[in-house]
Amino acid sequence: MTAETAASGPAASGASAAVPARVQGSVRIVGVGLLGASIGLAMRAKGVDVILSDASPSQQRLAVDYGAGRPPADGDDPSIIVICVPPDVTAAVIEAELERYPDAVVTDVASVKLEPYRALLARGVDITRYIGSHPLAGRERGGAISARADLFLGRPWVICRDAETPPWALALVEGLALDLGTIPLEMTPEEHDRSVALVSHTPQMVASLLAKQLSAASDNAIDLAGQGLRDTVRIASSAPELWVQILSANHAEVVPVLERLQADLAEVIEALRDPEQPGARRRIADAIAEGNVGVARLPGKHGQNQRFASIVVLLDDRPGQLGLLLTELGELGVNMEDLRLEHSPGANIGLAEISVVPEVKQRTVTDLETRGWRIAEV
């Protein structure tokens, strides 16, 4: 994204509406928390008729007030229904919506795919018109008040069809995913649950357990916290009641990952008990080096397998500095791929870490220094 794009805030509805929606007909959303309301905002920006339904009347009215869609009405005939409810009721709501709207395709956004699929089969439900899906997107805060039309941009959207899925139904779900700006990926429910156990569910537990150690820490220790700790525990503020459901539903895949992590921790702990014992330092170094290998596999912006170079700019602690930096990056024609900010309490400077493609790093550093910006070593 350019510096101008970064400064422009949430997705502009005008730009979205310029591209016709792939989904034809109405979209019904059941459950209008963060994900449901965000889907509604994005589809409304494309001119699609969005119907909002929620078990909580106040939550439904709030999402309507925010412009995510309209209340249900007699005669509604949606082409696609998106279920955005907690995992423990997902299967029941899918079954009810399939029965209520016999011409609609039903999908859901639950972060576990195998359990609702098995529950529907066990109930004898005809799932020809049901296709499970899962957008890998979210925020630490929930509810319609936190919804964003651009929440899904560039994020993966996993689609779990089976052998009985008709092409026209698959095309509807894929069209919805593309309308939301996501990258559709096909997986089996088993592959999906195994994958998210590693890249989503276990990280939640790791972040929460590390953040738990902060609760009894001294104020002096907390004052030393930098961006590394904040990045590591960022998701630890997630809702416990939701994560109990997610982790319980996917326990069969999460437990093996946690056990492997437990074994690695035990080895490092044993090495640190006596760093002078033969091989101890090597085991510690190997663990960190293997982490280097793992993190190098993570995709860059929008899922691209591309690496970026970092430039850390020192900002004076006064109003307008960040805005000025973004403006000047735009004037220099620098395409900023990512931005992170760090500012410690009491410090009179802040740090803006911008990511750019490696081939423009040196030119950007030189141009910024020419304009009087201070660049930190990275």
Image: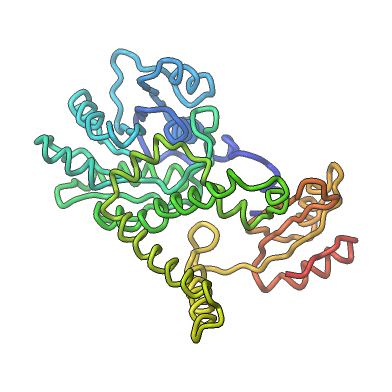
139 vs 372, nearest the viewer: 139
The quarter of the displayed image where residue 187 is located: bottom left
| Residue at 52% across, 52% down | 210
Rendering coords of residue 133 (x, y %): 32, 45
Reply above or below: 93 against 193: above
> In the drawing, does residue 86 fall left or right of residue 265?
left
| Residue at 22% across, 48% down | 167
> In the drawing, does residue 79 fall left or right of residue 221?
left
**Quick one: quadrant of the C terminus?**
bottom right
Furthest residue in direction bottom, as rendered: 278
57 vs 71, nearest the viewer: 57
The quarter of the displayed image where residue 9 is located: top right
The quarter of the displayed image where residue 364 is located: bottom right
Rendering coords of residue 304 (x, y %): 50, 63
Furthest residue in direction top, as rendered: 74
Q: Is residue 280 visible?
A: yes
Furthest residue in direction left, as rendered: 124
Rendering coords of residue 311 (x, y %): 73, 65
69 vs 317, nearest the viewer: 317
> In the drawing, does residue 290 fall left or right of residue 256?
right
**Quick one: quadrant of the N terminus?**
bottom right
